[in-house]
Amino acid sequence: MLDLEPIGWIRTDFPTKFGIPRQSGLVGELSGTVVFAPQFRDPQALKGLDGFSHLWLIWEFSENKRDNWSPTVRPPRLGGNKRVGVFATRSPFRPNPIGLSCVRLKEIRRTEDLGTVLIVSGADLMDCTPILDIKPYLPLTDCHTDAVGGFASDVERYSLEVVFPEKLMGVLPEDKQEALIKLLSQDPRPHYHNDPERVYGFGFSGFEVKFRVSDGKVFVVGLIKQGE
């Protein structure tokens, strides 16, 4: 058995899985902080990292551990009814619960209590997700302009208009507003949900975001400070 030890965790605005972008980089306005475990806080381990603009985060689907696995899964973007091979998807339900995300490195920051942390953007991870490894993104080998996206290409440009009442918008910190609007425009619901009256909710940056979807638009109906 392969024994993996997390090198740290990422702190993000998402306390639960629902609402998180389906892929990294889709919402570049989202910010996260990689905090290293005490035994991995040697700053020498980050020497030279400041020369890279993007990183690969290798992480654990810590909320999706299972004792068995299925060779096929039902991607939400295909309506949740069509089955495809697990290795043709990025589904969290895998033989080994390992995720891969490409993020932008915004800052390497030294702190008094947590040592050196990494400020990144575009992450698609839940708060406190274990990070197993970090590798630099190499444009020469990691970017393939002739790549084909399979069935995912058919839905990658999906976007909805977001109707956000001004009185609610003012409740949210200004630096979080654009990220939330872009996040909602991608329709966080499972695609087999079509009830225009159903109200959905997810946690984001200390708030409970309430919304419904009707006629190709996302209507924000509530923004409640969590704990109130």
Image (tube, helix red, strand yellow):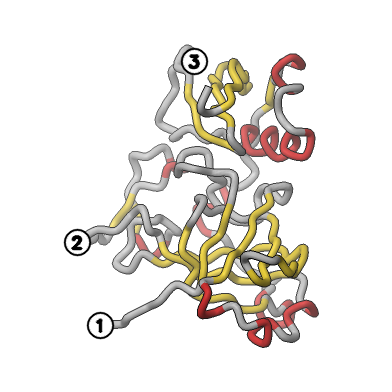
Label 1 vs 3, first from the N-terminus: 1
Q: Residues within 10 Å of mark 2 (few under 14, many from 20)?
A: few
Reading the image, the residue beneath label 3 is 196
Going from N to C along the chain, the mark reached first, 1 or 2, is 1
Residue 179 lies, in percent from the top left, at 70, 40
Q: Is residue 103 above or below residue 2?
A: above
Residue under the image location 43 percent in, 59 percent down: 89
Residue 102 horizontal/vertical position (percent): 62, 65
Residue 68 higher or lower than 176, as above or below = below
Q: Residue at x 33, y 62 (%)?
A: 94
Residue 13, by quadrant, is top right
Residue type at mark 3: give it.
Pro
- Of circles 3 and 2, the one toward us is 2
Give the alpha-carbon distance from disc 1 to disc 3, as whole Å: 48 Å
N-terminal of the two: label 3 or label 2? 2
Q: Residue at x 33, y 56 (%)?
A: 93
Mark linked to residue 67: 2
* Residue at 77% over, 71% down: 53
Distance of label 1 from label 2 (alpha carbons):
14 Å
Q: Is residue 20 left or right of 184 when viewed as pictured?
A: left
Q: Find disc 1 in the rendering and name its residue.
A: 1
Q: Secondary structure at mark 1?
A: loop
